[in-house]
């Protein structure tokens, strides 16, 4: 058997020998983790369960938390816009709240 090099660089990617196989040395980019609230957490669970390819791509590109923060912020804004409209349309007032 020939002696294999411990490390190689091919096509601009650095590989390290582990046993009989070369594995790429992958590093995730440093990203600031933002606070992800309710809607961001729901979307995170959705991505994990139903869109694993997109989930992995967002992790590897370092854009997962940015994406989740945007989803969370947009959802919060929509709720702030729609709740007063629904309250007005349905005629919800303090008297109705006290009854139910």
Image (cartoon, grey):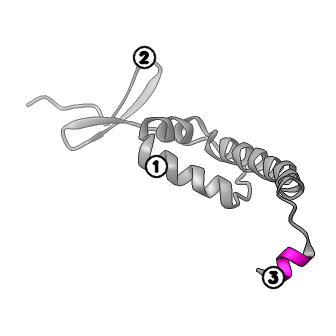
Whole-Å distance between the Cαs marked 1 and 2? 31 Å
Give the image location of residue 17, x and y in percent. Answer: 29, 38
Q: Residue at x 76, y 80 (%)?
A: 100
Give the image location of residue 87, x and y in percent. Answer: 85, 59
Q: Is residue 59 above or below residue 45?
A: above
Q: Contact (CB < 8 A) between labels 3 and 1?
A: no
Q: Residue at x 45, y 40 (%)?
A: 51
Give the image location of residue 53, x and y in percent. Answer: 43, 36
Closest to the camera, between mark 1 and mark 2, is: 1
Q: Is residue 66 above or below residue 98?
A: above
Q: Is residue 51 magenta?
A: no
What is the crowding at mark 2: few (fewer than 14 residues within 10 Å), some, or many (at least 20)? Answer: few
- Count the numbered circles shown: 3
**Farthest top residue in view:** 11
Give the image location of residue 34, x and y in percent. Answer: 74, 54
Closest to the camera, between mark 3 and mark 1, is: 3
Q: Residue at x 42, y 49 (%)?
A: 49
| Quadrant in the picture for the N terminus | top left
Mark 1 sits on what residue? 48
User: Which range of residues does the magenta coloring cover?
Assistant: 95-99
Indicate left or right for 99 with 23 as reference: right
| Mark sitting on residue 11 | 2
**Farthest bottom residue in view:** 98
Mark 3 sits on what residue? 99
């Amino acid at each position: 058997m020939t002696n294999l090099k411990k490390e190689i660089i091919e096509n601009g990617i650095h590989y390290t020998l582990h046993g009989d196989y070369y594995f790429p040395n992958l590093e995730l980019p440093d990203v600031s983790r933002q606070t992800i609230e309710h809607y961001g957490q729901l979307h995170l669970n959705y991505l994990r369960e139903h869109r694993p390819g997109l989930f992995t791509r967002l992790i590897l590109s370092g854009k997962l938390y940015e994406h989740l923060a945007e989803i969370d912020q947009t959802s919060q804004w929509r709720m702030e816009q729609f709740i007063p409209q629904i309250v007005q349309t349905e005629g919800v007032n303090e008297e109705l709240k006290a009854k139910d």
